[in-house]
Structures are given as structure tokens and as C-alpha cells.
Image (cartoon, grey):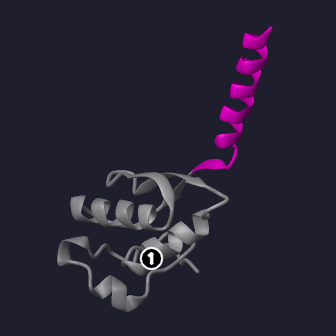
Amino acid sequence: MKRLVLFTLLTVFGLSAFANENTDSVKVNGNCGSCKKRIEKAAMDAGAISANWSDETQILAVKYDDAKTSLLAIEKKIASVGHDTRDVKAPDAAYKNLEECCQYDRTKMTPVQ
């Protein structure tokens, strides 16, 4: 009986530790391996638990605790280092500070806010 109670308590507490975790994906513009490092670092700096950006799909898969950060906060941090996201456009100065190989074509983009 004690084992059952202990198992139940551990299960409940274990599941509650992950209750605030969200996994999302968002389009982030970039070109190369340098972009990947910069985008993923910015996401982690904004509080992401994990971040993986694909240069082929231009999609960032991100896991975060919504009690500590949000997808919008992560997008804002990524934009601050020069990469436009689905919802946040990077400041022109940040975009222009990117290495030449990292400056993606903004003229073909769908407008972002």
C-alpha cells in the first residue's frame, strides 16, 4: 500500500513539473549555419528550454515553460539579433549588422508586424 501511495505521489509531482511546457514552431528567416547558431542562441537567451532551427524549412522548433517566457518573447529576442520571425520584424539596424551571407532576401517576404 505504501508503495502505491508513493508511486502515485511521485507521478503527480512529476507530471506537474512539466505542466507549463509548450512546444511550438515558428518561421524565422535566415540562410546558413551562422544564422542557425544565432537564432537558437537568441531563443535560449529568451528562456527557451530547447531550440532547433532548420535552414531548409526556416522553421524554429522551440520548447519553453510558459510560466517563464512566451513564444512572442522568444520571437522578439530573435528579431533583436537580426532575424525576422512570423510575428516580429527585425530592426533594420540589426538586420544590416548580420554577416553578408546571413542577409536573407527581405523583398520576397510576407509582411510581418
Q: Is residue 13 magenta?
A: yes
Residue topped by disc 1: 79
Residue at 40%, 57% in the rendered image: 58
Q: Is residue 4 above or below residue 71?
A: above
Q: Residue 91, percent across and down?
A: 43, 87
For this orientation, the residue located farthest to the bottom is 93
Which quadrant is home to the C terminus?
Answer: bottom right
48 left or right of 97 in image: right
Q: Is residue 4 above or below residue 109?
A: above
25 left or right of 34 in image: right
Q: Is residue 34 magenta?
A: no
19 left or right of 68 in image: right
Residue at 36%, 63% in the rendered image: 41
Q: Residue 87, percent across and down?
A: 57, 72
Quadrant of res 67: bottom right
Question: Could you tell me the amino acid type at mark 1?
Answer: Ala
Residue at 32%, 55% in the rendered image: 55
Q: Residue 21, percent across and down?
A: 62, 47
What's drawn in magenta, residue-wise?
1-23
